[in-house]
Image (spheres, rainbow, N blue to C red):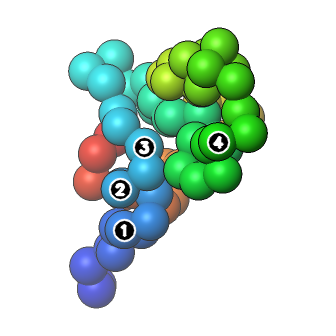
Amino acid sequence: MYKLKTSKAISKRFKITSKYKILRHMACRSHLLQKKSSKRKQKLRKVLNVKLVDALSFRSKIPYIY
C-alpha cells in the first residue's frame, strides 16, 4: 500500500496541540492594514480553535498527526 500524503497547505496554516485541538489564526491580517483601526488589528491577533465539524475533515488531510 502506498504512503498517505500530508496536505502541506493545512500543515502550514494550522497548529495541533498536545490534546489534539487544532488552532488557527484569524483572517484579514495580511494586507490592507492602513484602513483598519488599531483596535481591530489587535483583535485579529488572536488564535482560535477550529470548530469540531471542520476538524473532523482534517483527519484525512493530516494522517500522521493523529
**In whole angstroms, how far apart are the C-alphas of marks 4 and 1?**
31 Å
Q: Residues within 10 Å of mark 1 (few under 14, many from 20)?
A: few
Marks 2 and 4 close (CB-CB < 8 Å): no
**In whole angstroms, how far apart are the C-alphas of marks 1 and 3?**
10 Å
User: Which of disc 3 and disc 1 is earlier in sequence?
Assistant: 1
Q: Residues within 10 Å of mark 4 (few under 14, many from 20)?
A: few
What x and y, as percent, mark residue 47? 49, 23
Marks 2 and 1 close (CB-CB < 8 Å): yes
User: Which of disc 1 and disc 4 is earlier in sequence?
Assistant: 1
What x and y, as percent, mark residue 17? 31, 24
Residue 51 falls in image quadrant: top right
**In whole angstroms, how far apart are the C-alphas of marks 2 and 1?**
6 Å
Marks 3 and 2 close (CB-CB < 8 Å): yes
Kindly identify the amino acid type of the residue bearing the numbered disc 1.
Lys
Label 3: element kind? loop
Kindly identify the amino acid type of the residue bearing the numbered disc 4.
Gln
Residue 32 appears in the figure: yes
Residue 7 placement, left or right of 44: left
Front: mark 4 or 3: 4
Residue under label 4? 34
Residue under label 3? 14
Residue under label 2? 12
User: Which of disc 3 and disc 4 is earlier in sequence?
Assistant: 3
Q: Residues within 10 Å of mark 2 (few under 14, many from 20)?
A: few
Kindly identify the amino acid type of the residue bearing the numbered disc 2.
Lys
**In whole angstroms, how far apart are the C-alphas of marks 3 and 2?**
6 Å
What x and y, as percent, mark residue 60? 50, 59
Residue drawn 28% across and 84% down?
Answer: 1
